[in-house]
Image (cartoon, rainbow, N blue to C red):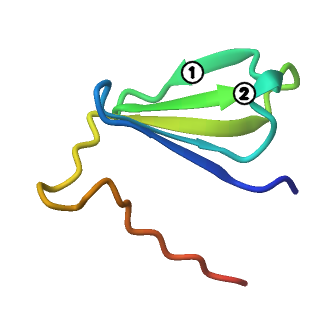
Amino acid sequence: MEKIKVFYDKEGQTLTVWFDDPVKEYVCEETGEEVILIKDKAGKVIGFERLNVVLETGSKGSIPLEAVSI
């Protein structure tokens, strides 16, 4: 598995998470819950985008993240 890449666009208020190479993006599918699934040609989800993400004032651009190994 590739490294997970996380991007936050403060102006666009979006959080994008990639599980694979963004170059493989082929199609996007809206879920209706302000989440867009990003898929490759085979239909495998390689990332997602969350709309309307606003960080709390004073968070200095940091995003809380918890990594859990299973």
Nearest the eye: 17 or 38: 17
Residue 12 screen position, x and y as percent: 32, 24
Residue 19 screen position, x and y as percent: 73, 47
Secondary-structure class at tag 1: strand
Residue 8 screen position, x and y as percent: 43, 41
Residue drawn at point x = 61 percent, y = 81 percent: 68
Q: Which residue is tagged 1?
A: 29
Residue drawn at point x = 76 percent, y = 15 percent: 26
Disc 2 marks a residue whose amino acid type is Lys
Q: Which residue is tagged 2?
A: 39
Residue 20 picture quarter: top right
Residue drawn at point x = 46 percent, y = 69 percent: 65
Residue drawn at point x = 22 percent, y = 44 percent: 54
Q: In which quadrant of the rendered image does the C terminus lie?
A: bottom right
Residue 33 picture quarter: top left
Q: Residue furthest top?
A: 27
Secondary-structure class at tag 2: strand
Do the numbered discs 1 and 2 sit on residues whose CB atoms are within 8 Å? yes
Question: Who comes first in sequence, dot 1 or dot 2?
Answer: 1
Is 36 on the left-hand or right-hand side of 17?
Answer: left
Q: Residue furthest front?
A: 60
Is 15 on the left-hand or right-hand side of 7?
Answer: left
Residue neighbourhood size for the residue with mark 2, other residues' Cα within 10 Å, grouped as few (<14), some (14–19), many (≥20):
many
Is 20 on the left-hand or right-hand side of 29?
Answer: right
Measured in 3D between alpha carbons, the distance from the residue under mark 1 to the one under mark 2, in whole angstroms, is 8 Å
Residue 41 screen position, x and y as percent: 85, 19
Disc 1 marks a residue whose amino acid type is Glu
Nearest the eye: 37 or 5: 5
Q: In the rendered view, would you say 12 is above or below 14?
A: above
